[in-house]
Image (cartoon, rainbow, N blue to C red):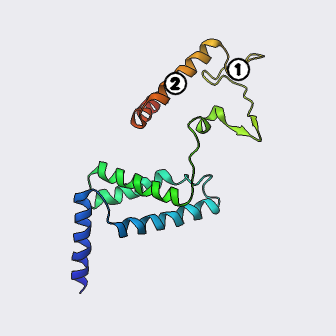
């Protein structure tokens, strides 16, 4: 009996791997577990947002699928789809791109004051709230516009080089 159950489970996993897609039951069970984990971590204060565990969860799902023989891209796509479904079920709303940037942080309706240039980090001269010069301002805005036009993969590669 035990070997029959193992073979049946292994057969389902092989079909999933070849299709690059999980069966509905397995998909729904994973989403349900992830919803519980995401809510628990957020409500316990372990994460500042509902998206706080997105990276580690995506990595964990992807690596488990890869160990089951999935192609990396198929595993990554499935991990992304599982997490997207879980985030929809917890009603998580992503901030806009601008809201996610340090310089757009707003506390109690006011922009957080800064003492250094957003581009070069030199001290700000009097009367300049964000950039030390027009050159830094233009350079910073040009860089942000390029990032907004890039695909997700291009942004990651660009950010890694920029750091």
**Disc 2 to disc 1, how far (Cα)?**
25 Å
**Residue wearing tag 1:** 123
Tell me if residue 124 comes above or below residue 38 in the rendering: above
Residue that appears at 70% across and 20% down: 123
Q: Are marks 2 and 1 in contact (CB under 8 Å)?
A: no
Q: Quadrant of residue 155?
A: top left
Q: Quadrant of residue 41?
A: bottom right
Residue that appears at 65% across and 34% down: 104
- Residue 153, how many percent across, how many down? 39, 36
Q: Secondary structure at mark 1?
A: loop
- Residue 16, how many percent across, how many down? 27, 62
Mark 2 surroundings: few (<14), some (14-19) or many (≥20) residues within 10 A: few
Tell me if residue 13 comes above or below residue 92 in the rendering: below
Q: Is residue 79 visible?
A: yes
- Residue 52, how many percent across, how many down? 55, 52
- Residue 69, how many percent across, how many down? 25, 58
Residue that appears at 25% across and 69% down: 12
Tell me if residue 22 comes above or below residue 59 in the rendering: below
**Residue wearing tag 2:** 145
């Amino acid at each position: 009996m035990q070997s029959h159950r193992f073979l049946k489970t292994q057969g389902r996993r092989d079909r999933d791997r070849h299709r690059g897609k999980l069966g509905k039951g397995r998909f729904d069970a994973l989403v349900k577990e992830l919803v519980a984990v995401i809510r628990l971590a957020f409500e316990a204060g372990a994460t500042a947002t509902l998206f706080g565990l997105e990276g580690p969860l995506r990595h964990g799902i992807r690596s488990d699928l890869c160990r089951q023989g999935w192609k990396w891209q198929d595993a990554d796509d499935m991990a992304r789809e599982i997490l997207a479904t879980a985030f929809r079920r917890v009603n998580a709303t992503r901030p806009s791109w601008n809201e996610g940037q340090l310089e757009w942080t707003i506390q109690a309706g006011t922009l957080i004051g800064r003492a250094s240039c957003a581009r070069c980090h030199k001290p700000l001269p009097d009367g300049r709230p964000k950039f030390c010069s027009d050159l830094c301002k233009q350079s910073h805005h040009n860089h942000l516009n390029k990032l907004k036009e890039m695909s997700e993969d291009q942004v990651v590669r660009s950010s890694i080089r920029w750091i």
